[in-house]
Amino acid sequence: MRPEHLKYLIDPLTKQPLKLTVQEQQGPHVITGQLTSDSYQYPVTNGIPRLTPKSDIDPSQAFTTHQQSTADSFSYEWNNIYQENNYEKQNFLHFLSPFIKEKDLSGKKLLDVGCGSGRFTKQAALCNAEIVIATDHGSSVDIAFKLTKDLPNTCIVQADLYHMPLHNFADLTFSIGVLHHLPKPQAGFNQLPATVKPGGKLLIWVYNRRHNFRAVYIFETVRKITRHIPKALLFRLGYLPAAGVHTINYLTHYLNWIRAKSLAKKIPFSYYANFPFSMKVNDAFDVLATPKSNYYYVEEIERWFHQANLDTIK
């Protein structure tokens, strides 16, 4: 972390300001140190503040196991499979659309909740954001730090979504593809409005249930078996569906080439047509390995926003 980013962080439990004690600094980054409030201490290791208290949302073993196994699954994915590619900016802006445009990010304070590898954190920072703070529960934060450490407007924090170490901070808080994997998704969502400053925006992306037979009934049925397979083997097995998607994508390319673009969009997995094969392997592993996914009707998600007393809901 950079010392100048301390002012944004708070104790995730007491919401008090934090003091920084530096033990080792390399260039602009505090590599090792201690963050202290009046009540608690948190380490800074490998350049990352580790603000992960034990959850009191649900202290049960089932909750803790689910949360940790999900973090471990994604950490394996980002550490062993993910490869940065030239389509990440396009992908990032796709997830924000149609509500947020690239120009809306310039000069703004942004919070990326569940940042994984930091791929979208990096793209947000490159859109001229004033500062992007990114959090994740798992060890994938180490990958995110390596990916973004040369960008002075990024700060990677290991944090529990149920106890966010920020308050009234963001012009935009976004959480892409995260909440639907949590043991208690709505309880996680309910922590996010407090991270947004008055007049700011909160954007989430979760799996759709309506007209999504393939994912809800096929992917989820397969996942009940594959999630128990050792991850190293599952990584290799992911090449099979990735190869299938890659082959289907040739049909999408052909239809685009003959200018049948409306038909091309109807081909299964057409979204992946421009992505490299490594991204298809990455997402295949995601589908096969993640402990659980939840799917929602848009009306359910709209209720979340209403119940959190948010307005101008789209």
Image (spheres, grey):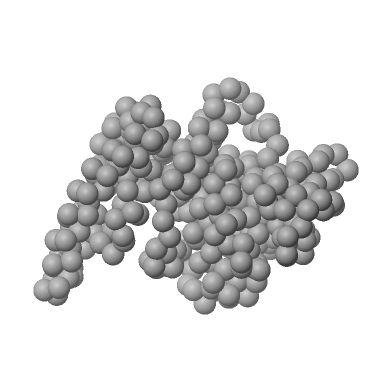
Residue at 53%, 56% in the rendered image: 118
Q: Is residue 24 above or below residue 105?
A: above
Q: Position of residue 50 (x, y in %)?
A: 69, 45
Residue at 28%, 32% in the rendered image: 222
Residue at 20%, 59% in the rendered image: 249
Where does the N terminus fall, quadrant-wise?
Answer: bottom right
Extreme-right residue of the structure: 38
Q: Position of residue 15 (x, y in %)?
A: 78, 47
Residue 97 falls in which quadrant of the image?
Answer: bottom left
Q: Where is residue 184 in the image (x, y as percent from the top left)?
A: 53, 35
Whether residue 5 can be seen here: no
Residue 54 falls in which quadrant of the image?
Answer: top right
Count of numbered circles on the image: 0
Extreme-top residue of the structure: 61
Q: In this view, does 149 lie to the left or right of 228?
A: right
Residue at 58%, 28% in the rendered image: 64
Q: Is residue 214 above or below residue 66?
A: below
Q: Is residue 113 left or right of residue 239?
A: right
Q: Is residue 158 left or right of residue 204?
A: right
Whether residue 198 can be seen here: yes
Q: In this view, does 183 lie above or below 23?
A: above
